[in-house]
Amino acid sequence: MLKFTDVILDCPDPWKLAGFYAELLGWEINTDISTETWVNLRNDGIELSFQQVDNYQPPSWPGQEHPQQFHLDFEVDEFEPEQRRVTELGATFQKSFVGESGYGWQVYTDPAGHPFCLCRNRPQT
């Protein structure tokens, strides 16, 4: 049996980054298994965890000195309210790839420098 269960992000301060994503997603920190150097967010499906890494080097999107290696996508109904919310939580806006139609994606970095995207896709017909 193989079951996908976790995404783990390296970072310098796992509690700070876990707090950002907990607020962003409305998930809870799982204090039963979290430690000083490992923090887990509780969810009914996929879990998101954060591990402390000494000498952490954030990705340099869009540069390749420290490539992004992965990124997270979040589907949104509208960009503006979510853009305001994620930046208030500590994300940094990087670039927009939204067309005149209002569909596309916007790239942000979280407080530890990991890129993530807010996406608005055309409805499936």
Image (cartoon, grey):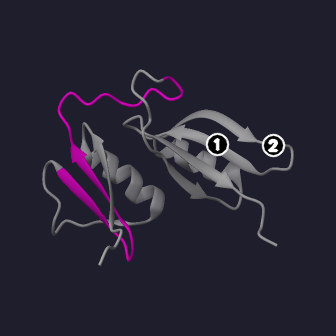
Residue 116: give x, y in percent of width and height.
51, 45
Q: Start and end of the magenta stretch?
A: 38-63
The residue lying at 13 percent from left, 50 percent from top is 36
- Out of 71 and 102, give the one closest to the viewer: 71
**Residue 61 colored magenta?**
yes
Q: Amino acid at mark 2?
A: Gly
Above or below: residue 45 compared with residue 60 = below
Name the amino acid, label 1.
Gln
Q: Which of 89 and 97 lies nearest the eye of the viewer?
A: 97
Whether 48 is drawn above or below 67: the answer is: below
3D distance between C-alphas at marks 2 and 1: 11 Å
What count of labels does the image hold? 2
Q: Which residue is mark 1?
A: 106
Q: Residues within 10 Å of mark 1 (few under 14, many from 20)?
A: some
Residue plotted at (44% across, 44% down): 70
Kindly identify which residue carries mark 2: 99
Looking at the image, the residue that sits furthest to the left is 36
Q: Residues within 10 Å of mark 2 (few under 14, many from 20)?
A: few
